[in-house]
Amino acid sequence: MNILAIDIGGTKLAAALIDANRQISQRLEIATPASSSLQALEEALAQLVAPYQGKAQCVAVASTGIIDQGILTALNPDNLGGLNQFPLQQTLQRLTALPCVVLNDAQAAAWAEYHYLADRFKHITFITVSTGVGGGVIINGQLLTGPHAFAGHIGHTQADPNGPRCGCGRTGCVESIASGRAIAAAAQNELQGKDARQIFSAAQNGSHQAQQLIAHSAQAICQLIANLKAILDTECVVLGGSVGLAQGYRQQVENGLALLPPPFHIPVLSAHYKHDAGLIGAALFAAEQNQ
Ligand code: ADP
Ligand code: BMX
Ligand code: ZN
């Protein structure tokens, strides 16, 4: 069976076919519309799925936002151009005429990475540092979603009571300090207006400000990991998202963690499935629902 997997992030929409051996083919990517209109996202999804007509038997979606009962509710609408409600499952079923399974992007990625690590660990936490900061928690081999699918939204735990106001309405969330959007928003002078990718290359070219912005992000993620260890006794953390996977970032997080007391130490791995973790996790999840 081929599954059409779709990953909806704050920056990009990705799609691919995934077969029974978790092999990916025909991967496509387009930009996420920066618009609060339902129609803009629907049109982008229609464009994304069009080339796959007749090629899959079901659709599996990993999406940013709280994905409860098929509906996308943005916790931080700023990440989706202000969009805060979207009938995700219904829209994709209509666009593809296929059954559709939907879940949060970081929860999906956690599920994929857990499948890869299951021989070694039963308790893992996936953290995506991307447009936002998301999370997926596996406890005793089970994906924790919670009664309202809200579990794992670790980017909205507080990192700094004097920090910036987060798009979710709280103050100083991890996401408001560590995410790609936050890194870009904090940039000043010669870096003002640059995105996180450009700030990472400026850091490589010796920009002190860029290095400080990235260090500040990595430090917030390091403290988040220590909090997760204390709350969940999670056995390892897997880092994903384009910021989390950027060169040198994981090492900075690990260096920070090594300075904390030993009970907070924990292995930090880079996502095995890299930028495809959400796609593969959604496909695995859908395949299990259809069994
Ligand atoms: P999404 O949030 O849509 O899932 P990504 O995981 O690609 O997408 O995260 C997007 C964020 O990552 C943006 O802030 C972007 O500037 C940043 N980014 C993209 N590529 C890189 C890179 N090579 N190095 C560092 N940051 C990157
Ligand atoms: C935000 C939140 C999470 C999501 C995380 C990472 C919204 C729209 N999204 O914290 O649901 O998992 O961002 O998302 O409120 P990404 O777009 O960075 O992949
Ligand atoms: Zn927040």
Image: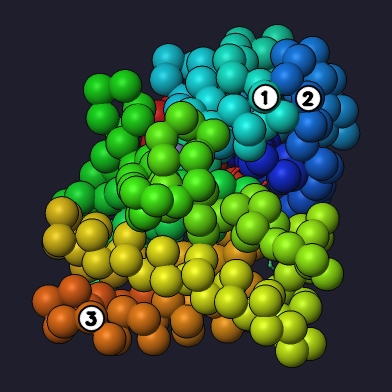
Is label 2 in a helix, a strand or a loop? loop
Q: Nearer the viewer, residue 11 or 45?
A: 11
Q: Which residue is mark 3?
A: 260
Specify the amino acid type for callout 2: Ser
Q: Which residue is mark 1?
A: 82
Q: Which residue is mark 2?
A: 35
Pinpoint residue 258: horizontal percent, then vertical percent. 29, 86
98 horizontally vs 29: left or right: left
Cβ–Cβ under 8 Å for marks 3 and 2:
no
Q: Residue at x 70, y 10 (%)?
A: 94
- Dot label at residue 264: none
Pinpoint residue 43: horizontal percent, then vertical percent. 84, 20
Q: Nearer the viewer, residue 56 or 88?
A: 88
Q: Residue at x 58, y 72 (%)?
A: 214
19 horizontally vs 231: left or right: right
Distance from label 1 to label 3 (Cα)?
Answer: 38 Å
Cβ–Cβ under 8 Å for marks 2 and 1:
yes
Judging from the image, the colouring scheme is rainbow
